């Protein structure tokens, strides 16, 4: 499974030569949802490949990963967007809404925020 090796190498390169099985498994399951039904088999394969990759030098890991595509060497950076401005908002006047509670205790939570 070339995809597993690619993600193991990427994880190892980003984290000082030691890949994390949990991180790789999450990445694989997110990119290939059809493998979720075979999670145990995939995990065994991940563990086997991690054993091989973690024995390589960090430079060799980088070299192999680069051979799979330069894009793999760039770490994804999640951008946090700003919330859009509220329509009809008046500066200094705050309006909040609390979602209803299944137990009916929404008012109890609101009191915690009252003056």
Image (spheres, grey):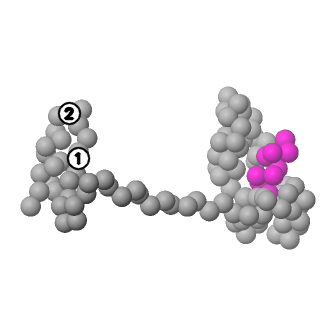
Image location of residue 63, percent across then percent down = 89, 65
Q: Residue at x 74, y 64 (%)?
A: 74
Q: Residue at x 50, y 60 (%)?
A: 80
Residue toward you, 76 or 102: 76
Image location of residue 64, percent across then percent down = 89, 60
> How many other residues sit within 10 Å of disc 2, few (<14), some (14-19) or many (≥20)?
few
Q: Which mark is residue 97?
A: 1
The quadrant in which the N terminus is found is top right
Taking the view exactly as shown, the residue that stands out farthest to the left is 115
Q: In terms of secondary structure, where does tag 2 sit?
A: loop
Mark 2 touching mark 1, by CB under 8 A?
A: no
Q: Is residue 57 left or right of residue 75?
A: right
Mark found first going from the N terminus, 2 or 1: 1
Q: Which residue is mark 2?
A: 103
Observer able to see residue 16 = yes
The magenta segment: 1-9
Q: Residue at x 76, y 52 (%)?
A: 7
Q: Is residue 14 left or right of residue 54?
A: left
Looking at the rendered image, the disc whose residue lies closer to the viewer, 2 or 1, is 1
The quadrant in which the C terminus is found is bottom left
Q: In terms of secondary structure, where does tag 1 sit?
A: loop
Residue toward you, 40 or 6: 6
Magenta span: chief secondary structure: helix
């Amino acid at each position: 499974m070339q995809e597993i090796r690619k993600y193991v190498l990427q994880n190892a390169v980003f984290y000082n030569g030691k890949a994390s099985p949990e991180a790789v498994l999450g990445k694989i399951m997110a990119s290939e949802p059809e493998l979720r039904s075979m999670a145990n088999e995939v995990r065994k394969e991940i563990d086997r490949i991690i054993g091989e990759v973690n024995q390589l030098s960090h430079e060799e890991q980088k070299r192999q990963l680069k051979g799979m595509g330069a894009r793999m060497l760039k770490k994804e950076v999640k951008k946090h967007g700003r919330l859009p401005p509220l329509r009809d908002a008046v500066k200094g006047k705050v309006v909040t809404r609390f979602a209803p509670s299944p137990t009916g205790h929404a008012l109890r939570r609101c009191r915690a925020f009252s003056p």
